Image (cartoon, rainbow, N blue to C red):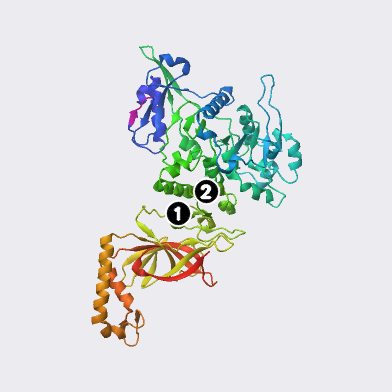
Amino acid sequence: MRTSAESCSICKLLLQAFQRYCDRGHEYIHIEETSSALRVTASGQRLLRFCTESKDAPRRPRTTSIGRPVLPDSDNRARFALLKKWLHRCDKSHHECNKRQGKSKTALPTRVLYVGGPRKPSESSAPDFVRLVYASEKSSLEYVALSHCWGDLSIEAKKAYCTTQDNIGQRLRQFRLSELPQTFRDAVEVTREIGVQYLWIDSLCIIQYGDNGDDWKNESGQMESIFSGAYCRIAAAAAVNLNTGFLKRDISTKYVYVQCASGKQFYISTDIDDFDNDVGKAQLNTRAWVMQEEVLARRTIHFSAAQTYWECGEGVYCENLTMLESSDRDKYFTLDPKFPARLLESGMHRTLSCITFIFQNYSNRKLTYPTDRSVAISGLVGRMASALQCQNRYGILERYLYRNLLWQASNGKLEEIAYDCHVPSWSWMAYSGGIQFIDIPLGEVEWIDHLRFDKECDCDHAIIANLAKFRNCTMKLHGEQYTISDHFGRKRGWIRYDVKDGKEPCKGQCIVLGRTMESDMQSDMQSDMQSDMQSDMQSDMQSDMQSDMKSGRERDMESGRERYRWDDMLSDMLSNTESYKGRYYLLIVRSTRVDGEYTRIGIGIIDSCCVLREGIEVRVV
């Protein structure tokens, strides 16, 4: 291949594609031909694509798609013409993408930025002035919403661009576009070029300083309606900070023009369609706030460093006119312009899986201020709770209360967030760091019905539950978990603390959330065995063993005798039978020293023989 590449343009292009793929750590490549590409068999990653420009369509091979072998220059008007065509087609053909959802049907942002129209052909430059306006003064308006990241700018540099109590008066009159960073200027240009006159940018449309945070507190609760109500969303994936912008790009596509002996004409070009890498792994999408912006927006124009992508309820399209198929099974649901309508129609298993994916993905994203963890996804969680017709408390959905509580750290330990107000210990929002949920197949656990949100108290941070405790077992640390063993040394389960706080370890107090389901035969066998054992032993042995079973399992140091309680002995005998396989899913708790009040400190899975359910109702806060 290297030898032939010296004289053959196609071999050279193919070799470059192979080398690019091998640079990612792949030693061997197995490729296959599809209708319009060569792709790697295992991963599906395309190496080369075949396309024909629309003007050559009559002379193209039947299996070759229409597309662009190279992208237009970043300042070429053809780029904006394509954006308008995407929007026009979606406006006319995609009914669901044009239907506002939830609060966005009537709600508008408090303020938007008026940007005016596009530059006229007779003008050498676009207008340099913009101004803030109150959306309530307009009977109706279409606006574009921007998703961006600040990057590594200093607080003083950020503050210079923000709307404050001091400069909002001037900004309501007008101010120069040149006062804004390049990313904001690029967003204004795109908004003008697609024919929309209003733009929403958080740091411009929300007062950031000088009002004790009152405006931010009010507007941050409106994110669900702001992004789902936007005409479209601009995602500045290429902008690593506010000053870099996202319209300029420095990437070239290599291609070869081919004409067959039969007269058919087409291009072979390097493939740059990599949405998962260009967009999914961009710095923008490491931000926690962007998660709900992405899911709630009805459609998005992604400006990546490689090319521009269009995303709506019908799929993802590339600037080179390719339509992409995602390997991410959750992508179909997060693309839903009516999210979570598709999810609810797919059944309980898919709904649970996608909710788990969203929470886990969000927990691993970055926040400038850790205390934003409980609000940066509030609009999205509120939408899910409304669709599920249940309460949401701090990222715990009442419909899936038990499963939502069974979270744990995904990488090491979590760190408690110092909120100004109380966030309950049973919520993953109380901590910073990635989380994962215990994967429990549907139908394998019977959930205990005593657990519920405390709805009789004015506060919303308590769960009502029944207290339980460990019995006849010991704990030993192994890595991040404690192994639970019975008094014979047999492993009975594990517990894991949420944080390393230096406090005393748990005293064996817990909340039982559920137990593993047993077959009817196992249950009947255990019930019959327990009944027979109890009857026989009580009649034949109770009198002989009465003195040895008065005060529970404990060793009398003076006489060397062991004495057992009746229920402990029965538990020991049951635990040795094959039919005894019940396991409890637990929250590990610790007393707050307020009567009847406990705080969560971890989770665990333990054999039921090692847990005594006391039936005492308590509050977990």
Where residue 588 sits in the image (x, y, percent)?
45, 65
Q: In the displayed structure, does residue 337 sit left or right of residue 468?
A: right
Q: Is residue 294 above or below residue 519?
A: above
User: Which region shows up in magenta?
Assistant: 31-35
Where residue 110 sits in the image (x, y, percent)?
67, 42
Type of amino acid under label 2 = Ser
Secondary structure under badge 1?
Answer: helix
- Residue position for label 1: 400
Type of amino acid under label 1 = Tyr
Where residue 414 sits in the image (x, y, percent)?
50, 57
Q: In the displayed structure, does residue 389 sit left or right of residue 578?
A: right
- Quarter of the picture holding the N terminus: top left
Between 235 and 47, the one nearer to me in the picture: 235
Q: Residue at x 48, y 30 (%)?
A: 317
Q: Residue at x 50, y 56 (%)?
A: 428
Q: Is 525 part of what is drawn in magenta?
A: no
Numbered tag placed on residue 386 in the rendering: 2
Where residue 90 sits in the image (x, y, percent)?
52, 29
| Mark earlier in primary sequence (1, 2) | 2
Magenta stretch prevailing secondary structure: strand
